[in-house]
Image (cartoon, grey):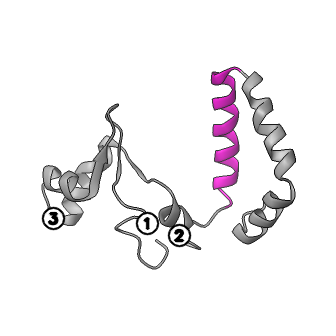
Amino acid sequence: MYQTSLDVISVVAKEKADENDHFLRSLRSYDNEALDVMAHEVNRLVSACIDCTACGNCCKTLVINVAGEEMAPLAAHLRLTIEATKEKYIEESQQGNCFINTIPCHFLADNT
């Protein structure tokens, strides 16, 4: 249904670099809210086809966001206070967004 092989996606992305650049430039003409709706729908459809434990690539290469409601369970799992967890593992942006402070993620083990 959807291509989820990172090797294939990488090859096709290189082959279609000009087409992708044109597409990305064309997105500037969309209303931001409409574009967000479309992006979330594509994410929903494609994410359902991906086994997140197959490669761990996101945790190896991307900034991992930590939602406010995830902080207490993470701290409890680590047997630390929320403050100690934040100090050791979390970085906070000026806007108050929290994320894991290393790439790859501290907690990545066996691609999960």
Q: Is residue 37 magenta?
A: yes
User: In terms of sequence position, does the residue under pointer 3 or pointer 1 come before the other?
Assistant: 3
Mark number, residue 79: 3
Decide if residue 35 is on the left or right side of residue 105.
right
Give the distance between the C-alpha atoms of the residues marked 1 and 2, in whole angstroms: 9 Å
Q: Position of residue 4 (x, y in %)?
A: 72, 64
Q: Please provide the residue range marked out in magenta.
A: 31-49
User: In terms of sequence position, does the residue under pointer 1 or pointer 2 come before the other?
Assistant: 2
Q: Indicate whether 87 appears above or below 26.
A: below
Identity, as a three-letter code, of the amino acid under mark 2? Gly
Decide if residue 72 is on the left or right side of residue 18.
left
Identity, as a three-letter code, of the amino acid under mark 1? Pro
Q: Which residue in the structure is indicated by mark 1? A: 104
Give the distance between the C-alpha atoms of the residues marked 2 and 3, in whole angstroms: 24 Å
> Please, which residue is most extreme toward the bottom here?
110
For label 3, the crowd category at 10 Å Cα-Cα, with few meaning under 14, some 14 to 19 and many 20 or more, is few
User: In terms of sequence position, does the residue under pointer 2 or pointer 3 come before the other?
Assistant: 2
